[in-house]
């Protein structure tokens, strides 16, 4: 048994980021054609395009502001005109900001998280799910976070955006399931990425001691979970919130 995404097209938002770039490579290795979305980092997007085509797959690079519906609509039009519309969506992009206490966090930080977590998913659904409905198949995957369950100090803006995103995607799963479209979430823990390997910061004693598996997860492990949910192996899974965090948080029944 293996994950085979041959014949599928996957759009990954925030594809040039620390986690997104590994998702691009992993889904390409599984056989999917890849739409590489970026906001500012065109250089990395072009590099990923080259990497993907060297694997033997097809790739398309497109820029958009995922907090703006008009920008997303234009992105869809460019994809439809020059590539193929996706049947796998991975909403990975998020706005970065400085974490601090509720009393000190700027109001615009809450607005940025609402825009990039909640509204990104709403806009991407409106833009791309109608096509999936016509094909009677699709995968819609949101990248959430363990923070949604941990609710630790200084995380309020991030948590509020991601918890709002969770609500939207659970409802969406019920609304479009009849069309053979699944809607799921992957919730990474504090993940080891290229920056950690560069700076030698893979291990953090205080954090790792709290994790049942006693380590941080890797970007590849997050991408593996995304690939599984994108595949036919997960065809009867929808509405799921899947923590990939070594057991630090555990959803309850």
Image: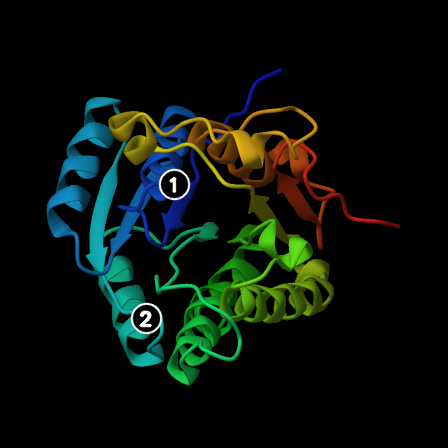
Q: At x 27% / y 66%, what residue is drawn?
A: 75
Nearest the viewer among 102 and 159 is 102
The location of residue 77, given as percent across then percent down, is: 27, 68
Q: Extreme left residue here?
A: 43
Q: Residues within 10 Å of mark 2 (few under 14, many from 20)?
A: many
Q: At x 19% / y 38%, what residue is drawn?
A: 49
Q: Is residue 177 above or below residue 12?
A: below
Q: In which quarter of the image is residue 171?
A: bottom right
Mark 2 or 1, closer to the camera: 1
Q: At x 30% / y 46%, what residue is drawn?
A: 17
* Location of mark 1 (residue): 19
The location of residue 99, given as percent across then percent down, is: 43, 63
Nearest the viewer among 33 and 15 is 15
Q: Quadrant of residue 172?
A: bottom right
* Location of mark 2 (residue): 72
Of label 2 and label 1, which has the lower sequence position? 1
The location of residue 246, given as percent across then percent down, is: 64, 31
Q: Extreme top residue here?
A: 1
Position of residue 195 in the picture relative to residue 135 (left or right):
left
Position of residue 236 in the picture relative to residue 245 (left or right):
right
């Amino acid at each position: 048994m293996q994950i085979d995404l041959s014949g599928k097209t996957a759009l990954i938002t925030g594809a040039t980021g620390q986690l997104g770039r590994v998702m691009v490579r992993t889904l390409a290795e599984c056989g999917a054609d890849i739409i590489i979305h970026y906001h500012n980092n065109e250089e990395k997007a072009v590099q990923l395009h080259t990497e993907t085509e060297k694997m033997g797959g097809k790739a398309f690079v497109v820029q958009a502001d995922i907090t703006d519906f008009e920008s997303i609509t234009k992105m869809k039009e460019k994809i439809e005109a020059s590539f193929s519309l996706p049947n796998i969506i991975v909403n990975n992009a998020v706005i970065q900001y400085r974490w601090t206490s509720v009393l000190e966090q700027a109001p615009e930080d809450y607005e940025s998280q609402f825009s990039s977590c909640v509204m990104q998913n709403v806009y991407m659904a409106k833009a791309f799910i109608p096509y999936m409905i016509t094909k009677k198949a699709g995968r819609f995957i949101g990248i959430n976070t363990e923070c949604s369950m941990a609710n630790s100090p200084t995380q309020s803006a991030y948590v509020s955006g991601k918890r709002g995103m969770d609500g939207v995607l659970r409802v969406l799963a019920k609304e479009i399931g009849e069309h053979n479209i699944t809607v799921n979430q992957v919730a990474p823990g504090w993940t080891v990425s290229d920056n950690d390997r560069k700076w030698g910061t893979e291990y953090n004693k205080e954090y790792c001691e709290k994790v049942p598996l006693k380590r941080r997860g890797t970007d590849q492990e997050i991408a593996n979970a995304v690939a599984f949910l994108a595949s036919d192996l997960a065809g009867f899974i929808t509405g799921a919130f899947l923590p990939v965090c070594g057991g630090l948080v555990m959803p309850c029944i």
